Amino acid sequence: MLGFTRYVSRTGPAKATFVGGLRKQRERRSGFNPHGQLVKALKADIAFRTGGSYLGGVVDVVKDRWKPLYGALQTGARTYLTSLGDPEQVNLAQTRDAIATVGPLAVKINPHFGLRYDDGRREAVRIHFDEEPPSPEAATAMLHLMARHMDQILPNAEPVLVDLRRGVAHRIDRSARPGDVESWLAGEAAAFTAMWAATGSPAA
């Protein structure tokens, strides 16, 4: 999902350049996730209602090369944590991954965690870590794909995309027509698949 939603944010020749780079990355089997410990810390603060103490401590335990990244994300993560409201009223919820078929493309949908509020609300949360905010196209694609498969991910939950550097939560635009979004995504997926095939490797 991350690769596809980053793809739809690009225009013109940048799309083909991105697909070529993604293919090379897959062939090298690279793509280490440097954010894993930060996500664990955020989830721990939610689960144990510790008000950001895990987020505060994780910067000290990661490797030196990741300290600037974690430092840049820490303030926004605390802002997001505070935005959840009374810690006693929110708990983690188990989410499941799903596979979406978008035109000719199979896209794995993998939220970072789920939330369950005491008032009955549920949220499936995907985190955006990049330096730049998520583009409207990326946010629309990600939230729509999550919403479409929410029965598998976390039944009756709302999809949420959290821009962690800024601590801002994005939710689905209810004014958008799902059919229009589906048509747009199908076209983007067809172009992605064609570009991937042109590089000599099957899409994955």
Image (cartoon, rainbow, N blue to C red):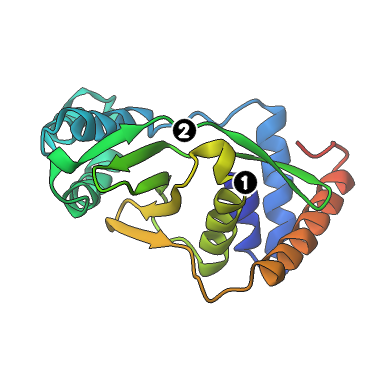
Q: Residue at x 60, y 63 (%)?
A: 9
Q: Position of residue 162 (x, y in %)?
A: 37, 53
In what quadrant of the picture does the C terminus appear?
top right
Looking at the image, residue 178 lies above or below residue 21: below
Of residues 16 and 154, which is closer to you in this image? 154
Of residues 47 and 203, which is closer to you in this image? 47
| Amino acid beneath label 2 | Thr
Looking at the image, residue 36 lies above or below residue 100: above
> What separation in Å lies between label 1 and label 2 (alpha carbons)?
20 Å
The reply to whether residue 66 is visible in this rendering is no
The reply to whether residue 87 is visible in this rendering is yes
Q: Is 181 displayed left or right of 89 in the figure?
A: right
Q: Is 98 displayed left or right of 113 in the figure?
A: right
| Amino acid beneath label 1 | Gly
Instruction: Assess disc 1: are there few (<14), some (14-19) or many (≥20) residues with their C-alpha within 10 Å of its C-alpha.
Output: few
Q: Residue at x 22, y 35 (%)?
A: 46
Front tag of 1 and 2: 2
Instruction: Assess disc 2: are there few (<14), some (14-19) or many (≥20) residues with their C-alpha within 10 Å of its C-alpha.
Output: many
Q: Residue at x 26, y 41 (%)?
A: 68
Numbered circle sitting on residue 95: 2
Q: Position of residue 174 (x, y in %)?
A: 50, 71
Q: Position of residue 24 (x, y in %)?
A: 71, 37
Looking at the image, residue 182 lies above or below residue 104: below
Q: Of marks 1 and 2, which one's residue comes earlier in the chain?
A: 1
Of residues 112 and 58, which is closer to you in this image? 112
Q: Is 14 displayed left or right of 36 in the figure?
A: right
Of residues 121 and 140, which is closer to you in this image? 121
The reply to whether the C-beta atoms of the residues labelled 1 and 2 are less than 8 Å apart is no
Indicate the secondary structure of the residue bearing disc 2. loop
Q: Which residue does the numbered mark 1 point to in the structure image?
A: 3
In what quadrant of the picture does the N terminus appear?
top right
